[in-house]
Image (cartoon, grey):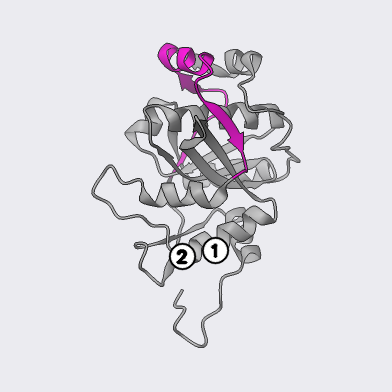
């Protein structure tokens, strides 16, 4: 997309939701870029919701209640931290247009955040899109060790309780692979996506900010 072109079609939140329903998502080259491009990977990263790996040390940390998990309380802070979180040498792909579009989807109830707080400070979190029974994870960050994992563990718990069938991570990293993420073919992904979109899942079925112990034990693998 070329915003400087007077004949270019401006991307709207509705168009973005339609793109997700067709298995594609936008990215920018960097935060300063005025252009977005569509991505439909040959191999798609997903986390099977019944195969999320939680280490004993992480489970122990979550039980200490040192952190508070909140949902959908500060979208802009989560996205700002995701854009700034660069432990590798890569630039962020989150530009101003992406922030604006996803903020609009957040206000409309389609975009969600899972936030990890400690002593009143946001120390970890993630955001993504919920559509039918599919959740499309966009980005996550941590300021303290394991706080992005805590956010992801809570998300998986919430998706399982809410009846979701697909957790899309888009791409796969060694970090995500260690938590149970796998790569599937584009054809397999679209098949799973089409099935998930037919489901009327509920992101808010899990009340409160804590983990569901029964759900954690029954749907996650402890290693």
Marks 2 and 1, how far apart in space? 6 Å
Q: Give the left or right position of residue 107, taking residue 113 as reference.
A: right
Query: Residue at point 60% right, 34% down?
Result: 70
| Marks 2 & 1, CB-CB < 8 Å contact | yes
- Location of mark 2 (residue): 96
Disc sitting over residue 134 in the figure: none
> Measured from the top left, where is residue 2 in percent x and y?
44, 78
> Measured from the top left, where is residue 151 in percent x and y?
51, 32
Q: Is residue 189 above or below residue 180?
A: below
Magenta segment? 44-73
Q: Is residue 151 above or below residue 29?
A: above
Query: Residue at point 40% right, 52% down?
Result: 83
* Magenta-colored stretch includes residue 47: yes
The reply to whether residue 42 is in sight is no
- Location of mark 1 (residue): 100
Question: Alpha-carbon neighbours of circle 1 within 10 Å: few (<14), some, or many (≥20)?
Answer: some
Image quarter of the C terminus: top left
Q: Give the left or right position of residue 1, taking residue 111 as reference.
A: left
* Magenta-colored stretch includes residue 70: yes
Q: How many marks?
A: 2
Name the secondary structure under disc 1: helix
Name the secondary structure under disc 2: helix
């Amino acid at each position: 997309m070329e915003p400087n072109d007077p004949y270019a079609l401006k991307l709207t939140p509705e168009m973005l939701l339609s793109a997700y329903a067709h298995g594609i998502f936008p990215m920018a080259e960097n935060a300063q870029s005025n252009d977005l491009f569509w991505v439909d990977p040959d191999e798609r990263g997903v986390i099977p919701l019944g195969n999320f790996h939680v280490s004993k040390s992480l489970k122990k940390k979550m039980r200490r209640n040192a952190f508070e998990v909140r949902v959908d309380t500060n979208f802009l802070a989560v996205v700002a931290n995701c854009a700034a979180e660069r432990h590798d040498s890569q630039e962020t792909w989150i530009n101003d247009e992406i922030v604006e579009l996803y903020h609009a989807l957040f206000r409309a109830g389609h975009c969600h955040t899972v936030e990890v707080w400690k002593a009143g400070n946001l120390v970890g979190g993630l955001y993504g899109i919920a559509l039918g029974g599919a959740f499309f994870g966009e980005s996550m960050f941590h300021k303290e060790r394991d706080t992005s994992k805590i956010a992801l563990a809570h998300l998986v718990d919430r998706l399982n309780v809410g009846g979701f069938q697909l957790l899309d991570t888009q791409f796969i990293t060694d970090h995500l692979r260690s938590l149970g993420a796998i790569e599937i073919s584009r054809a397999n992904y679209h098949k799973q996506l089409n099935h998930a979109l037919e489901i009327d899942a509920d992101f808010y079925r899990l009340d409160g900010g804590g983990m569901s112990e029964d759900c954690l034990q029954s749907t996650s693998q402890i290693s």
